[in-house]
Image (tube, helix red, strand yellow):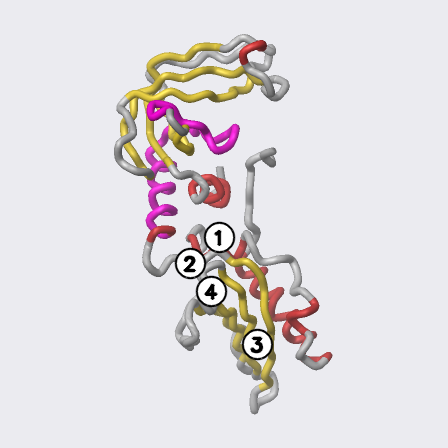
Amino acid sequence: MTYADLADLALNAPVVVQVEVSRAVRLKPAEAPGVAPGHTRFYMAANVISLIRGERGIPVEIGYLVDLPNTAAGRPPKVVKKSQYILLAARVADRPSELRLIAPDAQLAYTAATAEQLRAILREATATDAAPKITGIGRAFHVPGTLPGESETQIFLQAADGRPVSLSVLRRPGEQPRWSVALSEIVDDAAAPPEPDTLLWYRLACTLPPALPAQSLSEAEPDQQTAIAADYQLIKERLGPCARNRAKQS
């Protein structure tokens, strides 16, 4: 999975836990309504190895349901005893020893690298200065400089927590355009773009639309609108694509 795939799961999972399977029971079709074609549902009994996210108090032994793809020959897969997985799940009301996966593909084969990346995502998400979820785009402004080729564009974003978020593009003659993001009302001239595969990068690359909405440009003159649109595309190109490999979940 890509960073965005893991972030999509981790940020929506109340419980993230590493487990070792002790028993896998294949359910009959009559016991497993709604299973996608080419899949088989299993009841998994597992021992908890490590709690990556969630309230303490999860039992040492838990159970959950998972739909696994059949083999190329169309047969149900074999689940190897003591296989280790990472579950992205939620608690089941009134059933303390059961978990419910938040998505059909929310059982991940355990690797140390995957576990560490999930921990890094969750550490960033729970930090006091965590990058907020972007919910929309506000006004955009463009100001020409005193020298030919000098200008600054500022694009205001709307955040779920109400925090002021803005994108800036600074152009100076003879220099490469420089863009930055501010998570407060103060725009730091020394601010840098977010590093790839970080929470702030994810919030921007995976949320910003392909083009600015018309209302964001309503206060700009036609030539300013052209400059703002070009600077916005610069930001999109520098961020790069939000690559996802997961199939769309119903």
Which of pointers 4 and 2 lies earlier in the amino acid sequence? 2
- Against 71, residue 225 (above or below) is below
Span of residues in magenta: 95-124
Which of pointers 1 and 3 lies earlier in the amino acid sequence? 3
Q: Residues within 10 Å of mark 3 (few under 14, many from 20)?
A: many
Which quadrant would residue 205 be assigned to in this image? Answer: bottom right
Which of pointers 3 and 4 lies earlier in the amino acid sequence? 3
Quadrant for the C terminus in the image: top right
Percent of width and height locating residue 202: 48, 52
Report which residue position mark 4 lands on. 162
Instruction: Measure the C-alpha gap from mark 4 to mark 1.
Output: 18 Å
Q: Which mark is residue 131?
A: 2
Residue type of the residue flagged with mark 1: Tyr
Which of pointers 2 and 3 lies earlier in the amino acid sequence? 2
Instruction: Measure the C-alpha gap from mark 3 to mark 4.
Output: 22 Å
Determine whether the residue tagged by mark 3 lies in a helix, strand or loop. strand
Residue type of the residue flagged with mark 4: Gly
Determine whether the residue tagged by mark 4 lies in a helix, strand or loop. loop
Residue in front for this viewpoint, 196 or 158:
158
Does residue 156 appear left or right of residue 14 in this picture?
right
Report which residue position mark 1 lands on. 202
Instruction: Measure the C-alpha gap from mark 1 to mark 2.
Output: 9 Å
